[in-house]
Image: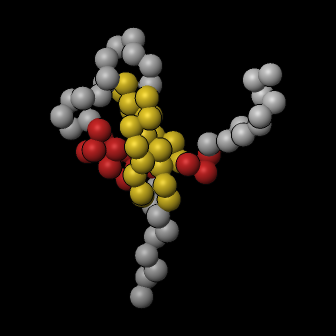
Amino acid sequence: MMAEPELQEWEVFRQEKEGDAMRHGGSVMAPDAELAVHYARELYGRRQESIRLWVVRRSDIHDLNDPDLLQ
């Protein structure tokens, strides 16, 4: 038997119209980047509510949780 591929969480950022900032739209679970992009397109692009998507593996996002950062 083949093992099920391990799912990873991917964060999706979207732009509604040219000139708008990218905004967090949500997340998708997928085993690889190709499927993550496909799922993101289905969820955030099929009704043409977005003109651009960024799909980023959550583990590649570095959290800067430092209270002194902005002081």
- From this view, report whether residue 11 is shown above or below residue 16: below
Q: Residue furthest left?
A: 47
- Viewer-proximal residue, 18 or 34? 18
Residue 7 in picture, x, y percent from top left: 47, 64
Residue 1 in picture, x, y percent from top left = 42, 88
Q: Is residue 34 visible?
A: no
Q: Nearer the viewer, residue 59 or 71?
A: 71
Residue at image x 29%, y 28%? 50
The residue positioned 46% from the left and 80% from the top of the image is: 3
Q: Is residue 69 left or right of residue 5?
A: right
Q: Kindly identify the residue that appears in the image at 44 percent across and 19 percent down.
A: 21
Q: Can residue 18 be seen here?
A: yes
Where on the picture, by quarter, is residue 45?
A: top left
Between 40 and 27, the one lying in front of the other is: 27
Percent across and percent down for residue 23 are 43, 29
Residue at 51% across, 42% down: 56
Residue located farthest toward the top when viewing the structure as drawn: 19
Q: Above or below — where is 3 with respect to 25?
A: below
Toward the bottom, the furthest residue is: 1
Q: Which quadrant would the C terminus be assigned to in this image? A: top right
